Structure formats: structure tokens, C-alpha cells
Image (tube, rainbow, N blue to C red):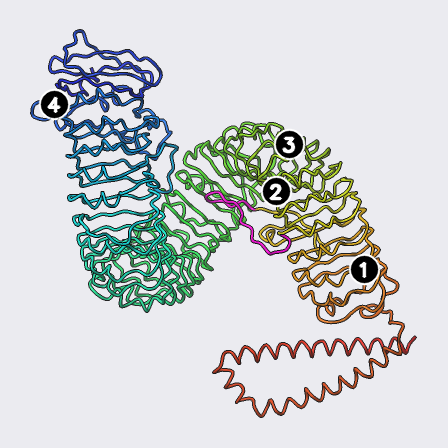
Amino acid sequence: MELFNMIYSCNDPLVFEMLVFINQIHIGCIISSSPPNVQLLDHLGSHAQIFSLDESPINGGHAAADDGIGPKRLSHACQCDKDDLNHTGHVVKLDLQNPHPFSDFGDEPYNNWTLGGELRPSLLGLKHLKYLDLSMNDFGGINIPEFMGSFHQLQYLNLSRAGLGGLLPHQLGNLSNLQYLDLSNDLDPNFVVPVREFSIGDALWISHLSSLKHLNLKSVNFQNGTHWLEALNMLPSILEIYLSLCEIGSVPHSLPHVNFTSLSVLDLSYNFISSTIPSWLFNISGLEHLDLSSNNLQGNIPPTFGNLASLEELNLANNPLQGGIPTSFKNLCKLQNLILAGINISKDLLGLDESFSGCVKMSLEVLGLSGTNISGQLPEWLFQFRKLKSLQLKQNLISGPIPVSIGQLASLQELFLGQNQLNETIPESVGWLSQLVSLDLEHNNLEGVMSEAHFGNLTELKDLYLSSNPLALKVKSNWLPPFQLESLRMDSCKQGPEFPAWLQSQKNISEIVMSNASIIDAMPDWFWSLISTAEYVSFSGNQISGHVPNLLHLNNLIELDLSSNYLEGPLPYFPPRLEALDLSNNSFSGTISLAIIMNMLNLMYLSFSENNLSGEIPFSICKLSVLQFLDLSKNMLSGELPSCWNDSSPIEFIDFSSNNISGVIPESICSIASLQSLHLSNNSLSGELPLPLKDCGKLYLLDAGYNNLKGEIPTWIGESLTSLRFLNLRSNMLVGDIPPNLSRLSALQFLDLAGNELSGTIPRSFGNFTAMKVIENFSSSTTDQIRYKEHMFITTKGDTQDYGKSLSLMNILDLSDNNLFGGVPKEVTSLFGLFSLNLSGNHFTGEITESISKLQQLESLDLSRNNFSGTIPSSLAALTYLAHLNLSYNNLSGEIPLGNQLLTFNDPSIYIGNPDLCGFPLNQSCKDSETAQSQSNTDDRDENEMIWFYTSMAPGFVVGFWAVWGTLILNKNWNLYYFRFIDNMLDKVYVFIVLKVSRIRKRCCSQQG
């Protein structure tokens, strides 16, 4: 009887049918007056059920409900209450909105309460209907039926987010009594659901909605829409228009007549409007809320905004507008919210005083100036807004201290000063802001110690962001904060060495980040209770010790980062909701069990690298169907690589490097079309590079060095892996020639083929490596919270290191320790961006070309253990960044050139093994001693002249010191040229001294000989 009690009896001469999504339930609907009659239609499938209302009496009615949503959903679908009927008993209101939020799209509660199927013309039996709401449902992408335009009495129509789509029917223009129309199709710009979108053609039909007051067409596609602004301008009663995310590309700058003067709300945000701000806006005198954010609006902010005296909210954020804030803003006496974030104001804060000096100072509640390139120190006028609730100044160039007067903003709820250049200490007056909910000071240069006094009255504080400041938090061990935080970020703020005991009092934590907090302590038992409500947890980069218990009870946890600590023991079980897990650089041991992996099917990021894990990689890894990042490197894993991968996997990064993995590279790993980075180095892999790897067209990094791979370098690498930027096949057993078509890899900036058995010559086509001719930056992929740390072992400058952040700078060509021969093609010297060139340990012949000086970015050059002949080119001295040089064991002859960078290489071992070389730093003098002696005498005379010249400069310098110094102070250009001259003179003096010492050594050696 519960069902009968919940459903109100409706008496209406109508018939209508609708398919309703209801799971495994038999339903009936009460349709007539007392006694209630019920028509029972059995459930015909797992999703759909037809129910009908008819004026005809039905005898023997009954209702039944099985387990499932039961009477609660049925009452929502069928019930009528007193507000749904007019005085004659006719239905005037039908509200079938899904009561569960659209943000739960796809979740069980949303699905269980979702209507769907067809919308049939029999709905027109509701002739008196004034209110129809089918929103938040899923009708499978069907079009809005044309008969919807036949509800002539309809005043309210809401079809938003109902799974409808297609071209909006012009018949909707027949709804002349309609006052409210909502056809919006998603929640916000950051929330996307795979639904069919609405689109609009000729929009003149909108002009017939003469009673319309509220219009929401958010996310309706206007790309092919015409006459929409003219139609809106013909609505005499319109109050609110929402057209965000409509792909509107242009808006007329002016209108002949502005008719919709009653308009109070206009939202054109998140479109592609490319123009100056339209002038017709300033004729809508009653406008209260205007949102033009996230477009391509250009030019200056017009001073005519001052004419909109009713304006309460103005949002111009994220447009390429520039210039200052008009002084006319000071007269907007009703303005409460002003959001200008992301536009290029580029002014000193002090100079904006006049724009806020009028009555706006008494009304403003939200001031959003984040990311506007404003600079200077925080001025006093900022702290005179008595009603200010939100001050948003993050991502700017603001410097100096935080004034004590910030404590005067008694109504402040949000203070965002993060990502600036603020310095000195944080004033204790921050603790006076008793209404403060969010405090963001992260990524500044704030220093000193924060104590209990800084938080004294912050009873409402929920969000505290202090990360990336040289701050220390020192409070008493028994301190009980006055707040209950939900989000805490104190990355790189000193907390330790003890684990912060005050955290134990926090019961509502959703996010906590205390990475690199100098904590040197055991993990307390209460920590796991602290994070019982948390979604995001990071304590990486500390020295926290202990074991991690099973965490299955942490049902809210989405991301957990405990990397770079001293945690040990076996891997625990983790909660199933987890999406990102980083336990790298700890001392976890044991195996990676099947059960641990299968309990984390939502994982997108997984890193167990740099631990002591052993055993085989479980095949269940392939069951992680949403995994994008996988790092198991630097463990003791053995066995073969899993061969269970398939093309449906979204995985982008795989790192199995530095383990004891053997066998061949499985072909299935090459079926992952989304794969971008594959690390297999430092293992015992054998066989050849598998042919299916050519299908990984998105691969930008392939690291298979230090294995036992054999065969030739496949030609398909150059033909198919066109996105490749890093290729490392070092220290394998590869044979044959280097394929010339590798040069097709125009993005390749790192090529290491060293330590193989390659033969032949260097292809001349290597000059086509476009990326090696420039310096590029590299963007690491990210998840929401944890950044994937791209890295690779690189040998350069005679040393092998694991490069991470600087990997993007590694423009390297290494062909060392092979059997290559012939000359080095001059095309190699066109790779101007090379950081390191290593051709050592081969059989190259010929001379070292003078054009080597073109490699201006070169820091490391190794040509040792070859058969190069001739002299060392003097142009080497022009390589000003050169820090490592090895020319040993060749057939080079003649005098070692001196000058500039070559003077810094005083280790004779870099030239050893060239018996015909002479000069500094070798002990072997050059044979032509007479020429050398003659040149020495000439040089001595030149040197004496130079000494007298420089000596004669001193008195003149002393006499003219103050005149010259004064001029330099007053004239910045002269200042710059003068000190550049001084730098050059110092370089010449340094070279002179080194040359002098070198020649004295030669002379001594010659006399001894």
C-alpha cells in the first residue's frame, strides 16, 4: 500500500504514453478519482516500461513493485500534487526531472532514476499543460519532436541535459505563452558527457516567443546559426539570456535599434567572439549581470561601462584585452563582482587607485585580478573595501611584503595571493580575518616562522595553501587549531623533524600535501585516520619510516603519493577508487601480487619504481583498462614482459628499465596505439625489435639500451615512428649499416647507437635531423595531481647519469664504440643545436673539419680512438660552451692551437696517443724552434708594448674616475658599453697571461732539449 499512499490521484481526460527507464520492476499508475483505478502493464524488458493514463475507469487495478528503485521512482514519474492541477483537476504541471545531479552521469543512482525512450504525440493529450520538465534524463540523442511546438498554453519548458539533440525545431516558435526555455546541454566548461549536441539554424523563430523572459541555450551549436541576435533583440520581455559555449564566432559591433532594454542578465562566455566589446551593450541600461569571459575580445576596456549604473556583476576574464581599468568604474555604485582575470592590465597596483576611489569601494564584494600582469606592492587602497569577500590577485608580479593592514578586511572570505613575488614574513594580522575560508599564499618568497598567532581567529578556514615558500611552521606540540581544514597544501614548508601532531585534530581533510616538509619521523598510527576522508594525499620527499597497512577502508582516496621516503615492508592492499598511486623511491619488498592489482581497476597512474620488489610482473597489469602511466623501473623484477596488451589500452608511458627482465619484447606491447614513451633499458632482453612496434605512431621515446638485442636497426623506425624524439639503442648487439632513412625523423633530438657492432659510414642524410638544429623545450605529460617524471640514462662528458628534468635539453648524437669508418660528413656540422657529439671508438679517417665551429651549443666532443689525421682546427677555440674534449689516440699532428676555450683544457690525456702533436698542455715541444723563438721575440716586444699601454692607462683612469663614474651612473647605455669593454679587456689580459706562461714553458723545454 506504500505505493498507493505516495501517488496522488489525477483526474484528467487524457491519454499519453512514454517509455521509461526502470530496472526490473512492475509498475502501475493511479489515473482517476476515488476509488483509485490502476492499469497494470507488465514490464517488457530490462530498461523500458510503457505506462498510460486514461479517463476510462479500469476495474481490478493493482500495483506491485519488486526490488530496485521501487515506489520512490514511480511516484516521481507519475504523481500529481495540488500544485500540478488547476481548479478543474486538469494537469498543468509535469515535472520528470531526474532528482540526482547530472555530475553523477553514469553512476547507479543517476541511471536508476533516468527516463528515456521515445516522446510520442499522445503527450498532446495534456492540453492544459503549462509546465514541462524532462531535464537530467537520457533519451538517447533523439531530436526534439516537432509537436512540442503545439503546447500552446506552455509557459515553462526545460529539456536541458536530457539526452536530446539535433537541430532545434522552428515549431518551438509557436509557444507564444512560453516564459522559460532551457535547452542547455551540459553543466560547465570542464564537464563533458558524451551526449548529442543541439544546433541551431535560422533563429528567427525565437523572435515569436513574445512572452519569453528566460532563455538558456548553453552549449547549443551556433556555428551555422543566423539572425540570432536580431531575433533576441525582438523579445520585448526578455530578462535573462545564457549563450555560453555556443561556438559563436562573431557579434555585430552595433545594432540599429536596441529593443531588449529589459535585459538584466547576458552570458556570452566561452565562445570565439573576435572583436572589440560591442557598443550596443552600453545601451542596455538595466543590465545587472554581464559575462563575456573566455572569448577573443580585443582592444581596451571601454570607459562606457560606467554608463551601466545597474551593473552588479561584470566578468571579462580570459580575453586578450589590454590597458588599464577605466576610471569610470569608480561610479558603478552597485557593482559587487568584478572579474578581469587573465587580461593584460600590466599596471602598477598603486596606479589603479583612481578606478576604485568612488562609490564602488562601498559595494564591491569580489575583485578578480589574477593573471593580469599587475606589479608593484600591495597598496593601502586595497584594504579599504569594507564589503570585500574575495580578493583574487594570484599569478601576477606583485612584490614586497604583505601589509599589516590586510587585517582590516573584516568581511574577507577568500584571499588569493599565490604565484607572485611577495617576500618578507607573513604578518600576524592575517589571523584577524575571522570570516576567512580560503588562504592562498603559495609559490612566493615568503619566509620566516608561522606560529599559533597567525591562525588565532581563523575559525572558518577550510583551505590553506602555503606551498613553495621558505616558511617554517612552529607550534606547540599540544596546539589545537581553531579550524577544521578540508584542503591543506604546505609543500616545501618546513614542518619537521617530528610529524606534525596538530594534524591529528583535523577530521574533514579532503586534500593534504606536505611533500618536502623536512619530516624525519615514523608514520604515526593516527595518520591513516587523518586521511580517512581524503581524496588527495602527498607526503613525498620526506624521511618518513614505517610500514603501510592495508588501506581498503579509505573509500574516498583518489591519489596517494608517498614517494621518496623510507617506507618498507610488503605492498599493502589499496582502495578500489584509487586513480593515481606513487610509492617510488622507498624500500618496499616482496612481489606485486595479482590481488593488489585487481583491486585497483580505476588506476590511471602507477609507480613502484626504485624499490626492492622482486618476482615477475603480473599479467593482471593488462587488466587495468584505464591505466595511462606505469613505472616499475629500478627494482629486482625478473621473468618475461607480460604479453597481454591490446589496442584498447589507453596506456601512454611504460617504464620497465633497470630490472632483471629477460626474454623478447612481446609483440602485443606494440599493439598499444596510444603508447608515447617506452623504457626497457638495463635488462637482459634478447631477440630483435618486433615489427609491430612500427604501429606505435605516437611514440616519442624508445629506450632499449643496455640489453642483448640483435639484428639490424629496422628501416621501419625511420618510416613509421615519425614522432620519435629520443632513440636509445646503446650497448646491444646490433649489426649492419645505419639506415639512412633514420633522417626522416625530423623531431629526433637524441640518437644513441653506441656500443654495438654497426658498420658502414655515417649517412650524409643525418644533416636532416631538424630538431638537432634548434633548442627545443619538452612538456612532460601530467595527471591531475602527479606529474610523470620522464627520465633516461645518458652517457655524455665521459659520465653516465640518469637525466630527468633536463632531458629536453639533450640534443645528442652518439655513435661511439662501433665499427664505422670513412670520413665524417660535413652535414653533421649543420646540426647546430647539438649538445654532445661522440664518435669515439670507430675507424673514422680524414681531417677534423674547420666547420666544427658551427656547433656553437656543443658542450662535449669526443673523437678519440679513431684514425683522424691532420692538424687540430683552430676553430675549435670558438666553441665557447665546450666543457669536455677528447681527441686522444688518433693520428693528429702539429701544434695544439691555443685561444679562448681551448686554454681551459690543461689535461694532457685528452691529446695522448697522437705522437706528432706538440704544444701545451703536452710536454712535447714543437720542432720548428727557430720559428717559435722568432715568434717569441716578436711576441715579447708586442707584449712589452701592451704592458706599457695598459700601465699608461692607470693614471688616466685615476684622474678621470669620478667624471667617468658619474657619467656611467647617469647614462645606462654608456654604462652597458663600458662594462662590456671592461669584460673584453679582462679576457685579453687573461689570454695574454696564459700565452706568456705557455711560451716560457716552451722556451724552457727547448733549452733543455
Question: Is residue 773 located in the magenta-colored stretch of the structure?
Answer: yes
Q: Magenta span covers which residues?
A: 771-789
- Looking at marks 1 and 4 on the same chain, the residue that comes earlier in the sequence is marked by 4
Q: Residues within 10 Å of mark 4 (few under 14, many from 20)?
A: some
Q: What is the quadrant of the C terminus in the image?
A: bottom right
Q: Amino acid at mark 2?
A: Thr
Q: Residue at x 49, y 30 (%)?
A: 601
Residue at the spot 47% in from the left edge and 83% down from the top edge: 970
Separation of disc 3 and disc 4 at Cα?
A: 68 Å
Checking the image for residue 847, the label placed there is 1
Judged from the image, the secondary structure of the residue bearing numbered disc 3 is: helix
Q: Which mark is residue 722?
A: 2
User: Disc 2 or 3, which lies upstream in sequence?
Assistant: 3
- The residue that label 3 is drawn on is 692
Question: How many badges with numbers are in the image?
Answer: 4
| Mark found first going from the N terminus, 3 or 4 | 4
**Magenta span includes 598:** no
Q: Counting residues from the N terminus, which is met first, the one under dot 2 or under dot 4?
A: 4
What amino acid does circle 4 point to? Answer: His
Within 10 Å of the Cα at label 1, are there few (<14), some (14-19), or many (20+) other Cα atoms? some
Q: Which residue is mark 4?
A: 90
Using the rendered image of the protein, determine whether residue 434 is visible from the camera's viewpoint. Answer: no
Q: Secondary structure at mark 1?
A: strand
> Looking at numbered disc 3 in the image, what kind of residue is underneath it?
Pro
For marks 2 and 1, the one nearer the N-term is: 2
Label 1 and label 4: CA atoms lie apart by 101 Å
Q: Residue at x 29, y 20 (%)?
A: 20
Of residues 979 and 775, the one nearer the viewer is 775
Q: How much space separates mark 2 and mark 1, taking CA atoms?
A: 34 Å
Q: Within 10 Å of the Cα at label 3, are there few (<14), some (14-19), or many (20+) other Cα atoms?
A: some
